[in-house]
Amino acid sequence: MVPYSLDVPGGVATHVLGLARWLQGRGHEPWVFAPGVGRVDAAVPVTLLGAAVALPFNGSVARLALRPSQSRALLAGLTGFDVAHVHEPLTPGVGFAAASRCPVPLVVTHHAAFTPRTPVTQLLRRRALRLPNRVSLAVSPSAAALVNTIGAGEPRIVPNAIELPTPPEARTGRPRVVFVGRLTERRKGYEAFVEAAGLVPEADFIAVGPGGSGAPKVTELGRLTDEALGEVLAGAAVLVAPNLFGESFGMVLVEALARGVAVVASDLPAFRAVASDADVVGFFPVGDVSAAVARIRERLAQPCDPFAAWRLARRFSWDVVGPHIEDAYQRATLPVPDGGPADTKPR
Ligand SMILES: Nc1nc2c(ncn2[C@@H]2O[C@H](COP(=O)(O)OP(=O)(O)O[C@H]3O[C@H](CO)[C@@H](O)[C@H](O)[C@@H]3O)[C@@H](O)[C@H]2O)c(=O)[nH]1
């Protein structure tokens, strides 16, 4: 269950839809529930819960389904499954409703990473106390740290995963530098990419993702299908991730590496945690456009070995990560002496 609307691309949705496809390939019968009203081509069953409300949060925008009727529809839909896997169980609306009133054994995955102010900490702590027994996962040390801060136990770290493409080939022609993400959200740092585009005339700068500013030196392609995004990455030399704060994982970094693309990224702990091989990934201080430009130029002068990039991403493929989630499902359904299925309880 994804609490964020599928009408806008996001890391949690990418992870969940990929997981559902992998589970289906393993013979399970997954079903994805999420807010949204548009069309979803996911190759797995999806129930859309209707329109979401856009709430600015952590430099981003959370699109959440807040109507009680949506929570009721979701809870009714969960009945009959062997296990429910709720992502972001503390989010308002259907996320918290699914987790706190879950009618079946429960696995939760925490994605967010931010430093909460005191009232938010208290709110999350109160919410965590209302969660039933559960198996609790977090996608990274940064996400687990937030769970710890609010006293919601010690989640196991199981990273996000990607559908690993076949090993990439070397690029030729004029180099392309790419940005992937929701362009208008401050946290994603798109302005730095636009500024860098004006300083590196020897490459084409391309942005993929909803939003857009009409920046003169950037070709803004808007939202693309997963397939089209894969093709753009396959033709790129460098992915730039100029994010400013609040990231828990480098989903777009891993996706780019898997296509053989070198990465130039803000020096954020969550980004270093996914890949820090100096031959493929160059970091620059957060917000420092001159340093970003220097890293981009280094990469253009000395392209990385696409296969080395792909190898870095391989440890985040579903075949590596998925079994840990299957294991969590099994643990959630095991009877235990204290009457609950969980290895994590609220403190
Ligand atoms: N097909 C397609 N996908 C897109 C597009 N734009 C963005 N995406 C996808 O949307 C996702 C965006 O991921 P992030 O930028 O990492 O994240 P987020 O939505 O802010 O997500 C949060 O959770 C992630 C997963 O745990 C974390 O990686 C991230 O740091 C953050 O906490 C990526 O999979 C990216 O490929 C588009 O136009 N088309």
Image (cartoon, rainbow, N blue to C red):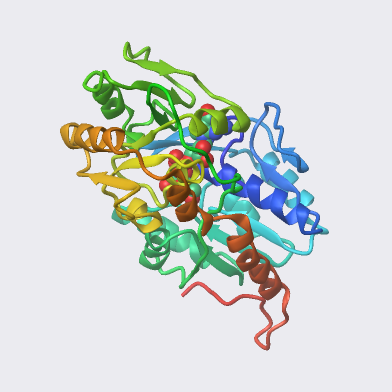
Name the spot of residue 85 as percent of width and height, x first: 65, 58
Front residue (pair 149, 248): 248
Name the spot of residue 48 as percent of width and height, x first: 71, 36
Q: How many marks?
A: 0
Q: Is residue 143 found left or right of 318 in the rendered image?
A: left
Q: Do we see residue 3 in this rendering?
A: no
Name the spot of residue 122 as percent of width and height, x first: 38, 59
Q: Looking at the image, is 324 positioned above or below residue 44?
A: below
Query: Which residue, as the protein is rendered here, is positioned at the far bottom?
Result: 337
Give me the residue at 47% from left, 26% from top.
208
Q: Quadrant of residue 150?
A: bottom left
Give me the residue at 38% from left, 54% from top.
275
Q: Quadrant of residue 225?
A: top right
Q: Quadrant of residue 55?
A: top left
Q: Looking at the image, is 141 positioned above or below residue 217?
A: below
Q: Looking at the image, is 325 positioned above or below residue 279?
A: below
Q: Do we see residue 97 in this rendering?
A: yes
Q: Is residue 77 found left or right of 261 in the rendered image?
A: right
Name the spot of residue 182 as percent of width and height, x first: 44, 30
Q: Looking at the image, is 92 positioned above or below residue 204?
A: below
Front residue (pair 13, 345): 13
